[in-house]
Image: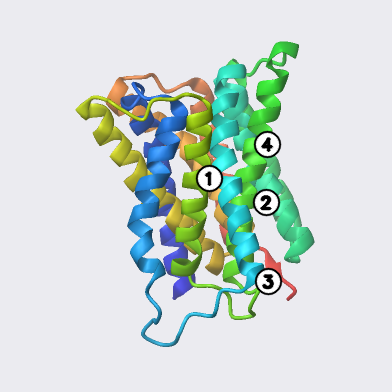
Amino acid sequence: MKTRYAYIGVGIAIFAFAWSAIFIRFANEAPPLIIAFYRMLIASLFWTPFFFIKNTKQKKHPKLTQKHWKWIILAGLFLCFHFATWITSLTLTTVGSAVFMILLQPLLIATAAHIWLKEHLKKIHFIALALTIMGAILITWGDIQIKKEYLIGDILALIGAALAGGYLFIARLTQTGFVGTKEGLHLFQYLPIVYWVATFGLLVLCILSNNSFFPYSTKTWWALLGTGVVPTIIGHSLFNWAMKHLPALTVNIALVGEPIGSTILAWIFFQEPISFGILLGGPIMIIAVILVVKSPTKSET
């Protein structure tokens, strides 16, 4: 039953992620790092009360060990620097190149899960990953430019993808008992700390960058609230929860739906035309997701 709910949760999360670009566009008065800081601050404040819930209906939460704390703090730092490197990459390379690097995240996650979680890949998964790369190329082809001056931006975007994958990978490790206690942590124990670590990290980066935390227009504040609630409290939180109940590749390959959803929403809100690349690459990526869902990886452990 939880597996079925996890699939539904992933679908809702992808829809929530698709709104991220829309809210960021509405909040463009604020610098990118400030947007990232406020979205994490809002999510952190929301989740903090849940951290102090000691019991569920069935049993007590497992105790947080020193090993847990190390992994959780690392996940928070990964999330913080994911935002920092991804946002910075957009100023140093083309949007298409940056998006393409992020769409490589399922490949990175699949490799990590294969090695450390023994979630072995089958032939169908390699086909799905190949389709993902093909779809990513078609979606971003018109904007991808391989030039020396874009190299730093491309590297930062790739690092951002790896950091995002690492942050979600740790969610699976800590919630399924691969580190710390065999029982695995509850989402309420794990997520608030991760979010607060990312929030304080982004706060430091904002201060070092001399970014202004205020004043902004009412429209910008509402958009900042939207980034905190929809793609973060709903999207990121559901993704973290799903990492406990579904294989790592199954969850992460669904991320390819984000640019498709964002494109449709941008067409609705900003009348931006849907590119030919999306029309070609989108269905290919959807096929890749279906292949993985129909034949999920299985761990030997």
Task: Give the Cα distance between marks 1 and 3.
Answer: 24 Å
The answer to whether 73 is drawn above or below residue 26 in the figure is below
Q: What residue is rendered at 76% in x and 62% in y?
A: 116
Question: Mark 4: which amino acid?
Answer: Ile
Task: Give the Cα distance between marks 1 and 4.
Answer: 17 Å
Find residue 159 and name its label.
4
Instruction: Please give left or right for residue 209 compared with residue 117 in the image.
Output: left
User: Is 245 in front, or is 223?
Assistant: 223
Q: Residues within 10 Å of mark 3 (few under 14, many from 20)?
A: some
| Of labels 4 and 2, the one closer to you | 4
Marks 2,1: beta carbons within 8 A: no
Question: Mark 2: which amino acid?
Answer: Ile
Residue 125, percent from left and from top: 70, 53
Q: Residues within 10 Å of mark 2 (few under 14, many from 20)?
A: many
Task: Give the Cα distance between marks 2 and 1.
Answer: 12 Å
Q: What residue is rendered at 64% in x and 61% in y?
A: 71
Residue at disc 3, secondary structure: loop
Q: Residues within 10 Å of mark 1 (few under 14, many from 20)?
A: many
Task: Give the Cα distance between marks 3 and 4.
Answer: 24 Å
Find residue 177 and name its label.
none
Marks 1,3: beta carbons within 8 A: no
Q: Earlier in the sequence, mark 3 or mark 4?
A: 4
Q: Earlier in the sequence, mark 1 or mark 3?
A: 3
For label 1, the residue is 255
Question: Mark 3: which amino acid?
Answer: Phe
Find residue 178 and name its label.
3
Question: Mark 1: which amino acid?
Answer: Leu
For label 2, the residue is 109
